[in-house]
Image: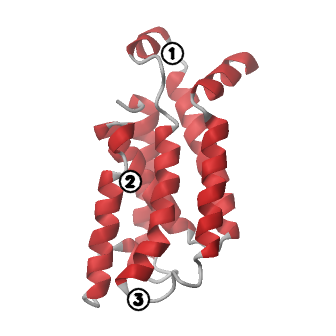
Amino acid sequence: MTIRLIGLYTRSRRVDWCLAVIAVTAGLRWMVRTQGTGPDAFAILLRLVPLIAAGVVVTAGLAGPFGLVERSASTWLPWLRCGQVLATTLVASGAFALSGTSMRDLAGFIGLTLLTGAALGPARCWTVPLGYALACAGEAYLDEQPWWAWPLRAAGDTGALAMGMALLVAGVVAASATGTR
């Protein structure tokens, strides 16, 4: 794999644009950090929507302009996609760590968005994570914390950490193997 191939791949995937949008969403998350605290539904949505936006940017960056030609002509694409997802996730982790965001939540939403993008395509990759965030906000409104609502769990909850990491690993594997439709 050459540097030129990696450069052409990142340019065709608009990685520079993706990194800029991730920085902006992390900045927005930092600006609303005081309003995003508390157990009410609006505060939870205010805390989770920037994470969904970062996941959408990571997933949308996988959309290639060449479609089936790329899939049939290249054997390096799964490795390039994996590298792109890991690099943009690492940048998002650094940016959101500066804003005081839980890395468990960021990893889980990026993984959920990648899984949705592999199944439904990059144009619809936001649907399942946003629906999940709304379901979590509804559970918080009812003062309940079911086992499946890992963003509502305490910061030291190992089960929630395992769910977030499992979603990230599954999302990276799915996105690397299949890309987005």
**68 up-or-down from 174: above or below:** above
> Which quadrant would residue 129 be assigned to in this image?
bottom left
Query: Where is residue 135 shown, x and y percent of the image?
Result: 27, 71
| Residue 133 vs residue 81, the one in the foreground | 133
Q: Residue at x 65, y 64 (%)?
A: 27
Mark 3 or mark 1, earlier in chain? 3
Whole-angstrom CA distance, mark 3 to mark 1, is 48 Å
User: Label 3's element?
Assistant: loop
Q: Amino acid at mark 3?
A: Pro
Query: Which mark is drawn over residue 39?
Result: 3
Whole-angstrom CA distance, mark 2 to mark 1, is 26 Å
Give the foreground label among 3 and 1.
3
User: Label 1's element?
Assistant: loop
Whole-angstrom CA distance, mark 2 to mark 3, is 23 Å
Q: Indicate the quadrant containing the C terminus: top left, top right, bottom left or bottom right.
A: top left
- Does any portion of residue 146 appear in the rendered image? no
> Which quadrant would residue 10 be assigned to in this image?
top right
Residue position marked by numbered label 2 in the rendering: 112
Q: Residue at x 66, y 47 (%)?
A: 20
Q: How crowded is the residue under tag 2: few (<14 C-alpha within 10 Å), some, or many (20+)?
A: many
Residue position marked by numbered label 1 in the rendering: 75
Query: Where is residue 167 shown, x and y percent of the image?
Result: 40, 55
Asked if the residues shown at circle 3 and circle 1 are in contact, with their CB atoms under 8 angstroms apart, the answer is no
Q: How crowded is the residue under tag 3: few (<14 C-alpha within 10 Å), some, or many (20+)?
A: few
Query: Where is residue 8 shown, x and y percent of the image?
Result: 66, 20
Left or right of 5 in this view: 144 = left
Q: Amino acid at mark 1?
A: Thr
